[in-house]
Each structure stands twice: as C-alpha cells, then as structure tokens.
Amino acid sequence: MNSWQIFWNRVKNPGTINSILTGLQNTAVIAVFGLLLGFVIGCLLATVKIIQSKNPAVKGLQYLADGYIAVFRGTPMMVQLLLLHFAVFIGVKIAPVAEVSLIFGLNSGAYMAEIIRSGINAVDRGQTEAGRALGLGFTAVMLKIVLPQAIKNILPTIGNEFISLLKETSIVSVIGLADLTRSFKAIADSTFEYFIPYVALALIYFVMVMIITVVIRLIERRLNRDKR
Amino acid sequence: MISVKNIFKDFHKTEVLKGVSIDVEKGEKIALIGPSGSGKSTLLRCMNLLEQVKYGEVWLDGRLLTPVDPYLHPDIIAKSKTFAKLCPEPGNAELKAEVISKIKKEDLLKKHEGAEFHSAVRRYLKENRLNANLARRSMGMVFQQFNLFNNMNVLKNMVFAPVKLKIMTKEQAEEKALKLLDRIGLPDKKYAFPSSLSGGQKQRIAIARSLMMNPEVMLFDEPTSALDPEMVGEVLGLIKELADEGMTMVIVTHEMAFARECATRVMFMDGGKILEEGAPDDIFGSPKNERLKEFLSKVL
C-alpha cells in the first residue's frame, strides 16, 4: 500500500469521517462566534474610546478599554488560551466549544476595537455635524449615518480578521478540543503517514479561507452600490 | 429671533471670537463677510451649538441655548453640601445669594458632594442636550462641503431626520420631499446617491434637506465656496428665492455681489470681532472702518 492508500483507507472509516466532520464543525463555530463576539466587544470598546468627555466615570472606562486592548494584543493567543482555560475558567460549567469561542471573542474584540475605531474616525466629521444640525441625537447619527459608512470602509479589514481568526483556531488542540487540525493529527499519528494528511488539512483551511474571501467580496460589492 | 450676546470662543488657546454680539430679527437676511480666519464660520457654528462657546450666550426665541456651567448655576449650587454648611437659613434670599456668589467651582469639585447634587448636575446637563437638539430643528444649516449622508439616497437624505424625530410620517415626509425636489428641479434624482451628483446638485439638495424641517432660520456657511464657478449661480439663485419668500437667514459668504443684492444687513468681521455693520449700500458704498476699506479694495 502506498501513502495515499493508507490515508484513504483511514479516512473512509466512519469513525474518522465523524471526527473530521466534528472537527470541521468546531472550527467553524469557534471562528464564527469568535468573530461575532469580537465584533460586539469591539463596538463597545470603540464607542467608549471615541466619546469625548471629561466625566471621571467615562475616563475610567476609557483607561479600562485601553488596558483591555493592551493586554489582549500584547500577549500571544496561545498563552491567553492556556491561561484562561486552565486557570481562569477552571470549574466553570460550560461546553468546551462555547468556552473557546468566548476566549477567541475576547481576543478578537481587542483587535476589532481598533479596526472599528479607525473606521469611525475615517468618516468625515461633516456627516456627524450635518446629522446633529438637523436635530438628531448622538445615537441616531452614530447608528444610522456614521457606523454604516464606517463598516463599509472596514469590511476588508474585518475579512482579514476573520481569516486570521479561522486559522488561529488551529491552536485549540493544545487544550484537547477536537477541532479540524486535531482530527487530521490523529490520522497522521495513527498511520505514521504525515505528508498527505497535513497537505489535505492545509487544503481544507485554504478552501475555507477562499470561501470567506469570495463572500466578503460579494458583500463589499453590494455595499458599494452607492458608488459609481 | 436669534440673539448672540458677547460670545467668546477659542480653539486650543487661539481666540477665534472675542466678544461678538448679533441680533437677528425675523425676516432679516444677514451677510457675514470678512477675510479667512476672521471667525465668521465659527460664529455661525456657535449659533446652532455645533461649537461650544467658552463664554457668552446664544438665545433663540427667548430661550437660552448655551449651557451655563452647572457648577456656576445658582439653583444647582444651592443643592450642594458646601452650600448647606455655609448657609444656615436657606429661606433668607439675600443671604442665599451672597453665599452662592462666594462658592467657587473648584470648591464644589474638590469636596465630596452628596448624590443629590450630582444627580442635579446630570439632570441639568441632560436637559441642556435635549434643548440643543430641539433648538437645532428650527435652525437649518447648510455647509460648505454639502455633507449629504453618503450612505443614503437623495430621498432618504431628506426624509431621514423628520421621520426619525417623529415630526412627520414617512408618507408625509416623502410627499414634502418630492415637492421640494420638484421645486429645485431635481425630481429625477430622488434615488440617486450623493456620489453621483454634481456639487451644485448636492448643495441644492442639502438646502432642500434643511427645509424639510420647516426651519425658522437658515444658516449658510459659505454655501458656494466649494463649487465650480458655473454651479455657483444655481445655488445662489435658490438662496435668493428663499430670501424673497421671507426666510430669515444668516449667510457667511465671499460672494460680495450676492451679499450686496440679497442681504438686508451686512457685517464685516476681522480678528474675531465685528468691525462694522450696516445696510449693504453703506458697507459697500461708504465703508468707514480702515480694515473694511482695505478688504473691499482687494476683493471687489
């Protein structure tokens, strides 16, 4: 039997197919929910950071937001995962996939905050002023005028963030979660064939990234209908 | 209608307005002229509170718009613990006024003042914000850079604020918007996005958007300065039409011929002050101020 046949025989095994599908599902869930949670956290942090106020409570929140971003951007994802999983969330009754999604969301939120903030700052001040001059409140101007334009500007960057998030989920096997990488590592370890399983794994990630790229491009084109 | 009393404004310690007062009466058309950096635009922006004034008052129809610092407001000071300590009998109006005048802002910021005081400060600031939003509805503002909402088409640009603020239903707003678009000659642009319009079209739509709110006064901040020369006419024509209908307006402009023809009063500003004001014919025909003479000799 050559390497390819060994690999193929193993994959045909229903147990292996199941573990690959579970792994694929876990990877996708972690990436998608991590991104969504990161977006929500990012919006909150960005809002806190752009408010211009001398109110001590707001100032305090801004220092907290800065601290949060500094810590999550300043330490490796792997270290955060190990620390949060083995030391902080220990004893918390929560599904492992949900827990890991949360950790990825917390990490992604820090990056997302800076992306969203720069997107908001890039929207012309005149847009806000025109809204306020019509008597609209801060929230309405932000949600309906500034944010839609900001999101359109940062969409490619969010796509980038999603892609790197998806690829980074491959480290979750260190805490024993059955993701895509782990299912292929199991195949490689049990057959002593390394080249083909890992090339196949790389291909699957590559296809997923391509799908994201295409989807982002479609959304971008749709949002750009107001441009000539 | 709008009354500006002795306002001061600075940007990072550069004084831009140094004690400016204007009274705008109903139906008046005031043209603000002057060299760049003289504070004309800032004055206009202070009128509808896009800029916070450092000192002075802006009144609209007898309502004070500019917020007084809450820590300087007598009613709020009277709620502080510092006041309670210093004034044993708050019923005595004379004593009360005297004690209040002695309490400084720093005193109130330094000490711990109970929850009642802080909630009074917060309530006061919130009311002020609401006041400012309400006041802006009756003041239409037109910007040099048009500032149409880029993410909305022309119709949505016009109906968004009145519908969001529940002044009109969507149907009423759309009907009014279509009438206005007819009037400015752009009915076929209702679904166009701002990026596909020319500067003159954008500015006319921006004016129509302000008119959607039925403003009592229109503020124009150099409405033609960002336009190609051939488009200036169409925008000035529309402004002239509004003026002839009796709209009260304040226009910051470099179009001297327009100011002379359209304004009922012209004000010349330089260095953050109004140096001369009067009827257009007096200002342009027989200027008295040296700086104004010099300015006119360069621009006319």
Image (tube, coloured by chain):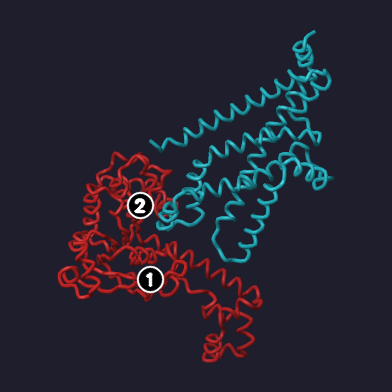
Chain colours: A cyan, B red
Of residues B188 and B150, the one nearer the viewer is: B150
* Three-letter amino acid code of the residue under disc 2: Gln
Q: On the rendered structure, is A196 left or right of B259?
A: right
SS state under label 1:
strand
Asked if A170 appears above or below B286 in the picture, the reply is above
* Three-letter amino acid code of the residue under disc 1: Leu
Dot 1: few (<14), some (14–19), or many (≥20) neighbours within 10 Å? Answer: many
Residue at horizontal 72%, vertical 43%? A76
Which labelled disc corresponds to residue B145? 2
Asked if A226 appears above or below A53 in the picture, the reply is above
Q: Residue B178 appears in which quarter of the rendering?
A: top left
Residue B237: where, in percent of width, then height?
21, 53
Residue A60: where, in percent of width, then height?
65, 62
Q: On the rendered structure, is B78 left or right of A188?
A: left
Tag 1–tag 2 contact (CB < 8 Å): no
Q: On the rendered structure, is B159 left or right of B111?
A: left
Residue A107: where, in percent of width, then height?
68, 44
Residue at horizontal 21%, vertical 55%? B241
In which chain is the residue bearing label 2?
A: B
Quarter of the figure that contains the C terminus of chain B: bottom left
Residue B277: where, in percent of width, then height?
24, 73
Dot 2: few (<14), some (14–19), or many (≥20) neighbours within 10 Å? Answer: some
The answer to which of marks 1 and 2 sits earlier in the sequence is 1
In which chain is the residue bearing label 1?
A: B
Of residues A63 and A18, the one nearer the viewer is: A63
Residue at horizontal 38%, vertical 51%? B147
Name the residue tied to disc 1.
B17
Q: On the rendered structure, is B252 left or right of A163?
A: left
SS state under label 2:
loop
Q: Residue B102 appears in which quarter of the rendering?
A: bottom right
Of residues A148 and B42, the one nearer the viewer is: B42
Asked if B256 appears above or below B285 in the picture, the reply is above
